[in-house]
Amino acid sequence: MSNRMHLNRRHVLGGAAAGAAALALAACSRTDQGGDGDGNGLLQKAQDGGTLRVAYADEAPYAYTADDGSVTGQSVAVQLYLLDKLGIKADQIEWKLTAWESLISGLGTNHDMVIAGMYVTPERCEAVAFANPDYVMPDALMVQAGNPGGWTTLNDMAGTDGVIGVMNGTSEQEVADAIFDEERINVQADLPALILELKAGRVDAIGLTRANLVLAAEADADLEVTEGFWLVDPETNQDIIGAGAAVFQPGDTGFRDALNGELETLLADTATWEGLVAEYGFTVEENHPEGLTAQDLCPDTYQ
């Protein structure tokens, strides 16, 4: 994507399709409130040296297990920086590798916080307290080298006879379900499975966030990735802004708000922000959220 995709506050996901990517979160009912009534209990515990249980889902480049066994990624780098500013050190964190569909439902039982680059959506906001986004990420299509079908965007592809490959429980699946015929959607559990389908000719293109696809294509000369684009809400015809953030229980909003304060300072210092995320393929031009808030993305369900 050569030009900056400017964020328009009117062009955020709304309406019935607002729960894009929530299919994987079947337990997306409101989580246990958590906290101690003023929203600061978990923060105070962590600032007093207590253990903070943090869930991630092993998805590069957001949060994943490195070869040496450490947890790394764009979201990890940003959130560890912010937690350190709040006086919470990396050695206080107990990392919890968690299935994607259990990241929200496990809040308060398995873990206290989610650092997984999770997109902020209105449906998810009904269940949890999102921090403000620390990145935005366009979608893209992965295709065979040379893009023989000439595919450009997921929404445009719906008007053709092409078969789209999507990962179960993602925004891309949600949109595809609304605009593709059922027999033209190939759903798999993960990207490696989708790549096998693409190479076998059973899908014409894979729709996913651009960062995931670029990482995979860099290691495979038979694949390439299109320019970035925003998914389009089929009901409102508005862009769906993919923006990821940390996640808390609704009762831990004091912690969330303190984190937001540090995030605002970090985002204003674009050099420091990019220094944290550049090694994961993120740039100010393409991925800086420009002051986008969780409330912008969840005007009716933010908590």
Image: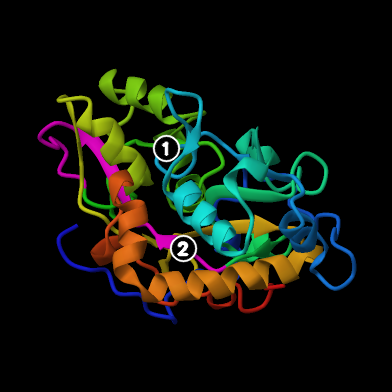
Residue toward you, 4 or 62? 62
Disc 1 marks which amino acid?
Ala
Q: Residue at x 62, y 41 (%)?
A: 91
Residue toward you, 114 or 277? 277
For label 1, the residue is 60
Residue toward you, 293 or 235? 293
On the rendered structure, is 178 left or right of 90? left
SS at circle 1: loop
State the image coordinates of residue 66 (x, y, percent, origin top left).
Answer: 44, 29
Furthest-left residue in view? 146
State the image coordinates of residue 59 (x, y, percent, origin top left).
Answer: 47, 37
On the rendered structure, is 17 left or right of 232? right
SS at circle 2: loop
Asked if marks 1 and 2 touch (Cβ < 8 Å), the reply is: no
Q: Main secondary structure of the magenta part?
A: loop
Disc 2 marks which amino acid?
Asp
Q: CA distance from mark 1 to mark 2?
A: 16 Å
Which quadrant, please, contains the N terminus? bottom left
For label 2, the residue is 134
Q: Residue at x 40, y 69 (%)?
A: 289
Q: Residue at x 22, y 68 (%)?
A: 4
On the rendered structure, is 61 left or right of 263? left
Residue bounds of the magenta highlight: 132-151
Residue 85 can be seen in this image:
yes
Look at the picture and state if 280 lies above or below 83: above
